Amino acid sequence: MKCEQMEHWLIAYLDERANPAKRREVEAHLAVCGPCQTRAEEFRALWGVLDEVPMEAPTPAFDARLRARIAQEPRPSAFGWLLPSPRLAFAASLLLLLSVWIYSLPPAIHSIPAVPPSSEAEFKMIKDLPVLEDYDVLANFDALSELPMATPADGDRVM
């Protein structure tokens, strides 16, 4: 166990609230680490002094003053949760303003205009596109190259 972890578990160990496995880990660390052992002894000494200080109960006047201060606090309204926080209201208004501004921009900014074919050759190429796609699929069809080639017999004619 490292000293940083020891700081987390030391109070629970000294209060005897740590589970047995953690107690063994803390005791093993205290056996080898002088600074942590000194810190544990300082905590024990401090708690010894605090145990000697008498406990004082609060006076009835303190209880009355505390209840009066609590009663003076403003009570939240039943619909107070409906009021948005200032940050939320500011963010929502900026979002609304931004969306109105984007909507008011000219349509040329919103969309990319379609470019019509500029010449007859381009139009013909677009017209023959399905044929070109079929040719491209058949020209690059690698599965046909994996099929075994049939060799013609002596009497068969090859066309």
Image (tube, rainbow, N blue to C red):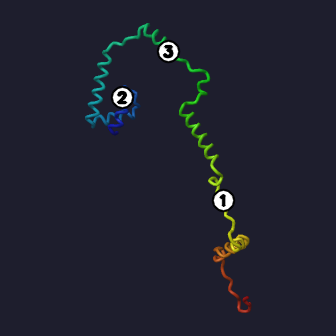
User: Label 3, on which residue?
Assistant: 70
- Callout 1: few (<14), some (14-19), or many (20+) C-alpha neighbours within 10 Å? few
Q: What element carries label 3?
A: helix
- Which quadrant of the figure contains the N terminus? top left
- Relative depth, front residue between 128 and 58: 128
Cα gap from disc 1 to disc 3, whole angstroms: 67 Å
Q: Is residue 78 above or below residue 67?
A: below
Could you say which quadrant of the image residue 96 lies in?
top right
Label drawn at residue 11: 2
The numbered mark, 1 or 2, whose residue comes first in the sequence reads 2
Residue appearing at x 64%, y 51% in the figure:
106
How far from the left and from the top, in percent, is residue 142?
63, 74
Q: Which amino acid does label 2 sit on?
A: Ile
- Callout 2: few (<14), some (14-19), or many (20+) C-alpha neighbours within 10 Å? some
Q: Is residue 56 above or below residue 151?
A: above
* Residue found at the far bottom of this picture: 155
Q: Do the residues under discs 1 and 2 have CB atoms within 8 angstroms?
A: no
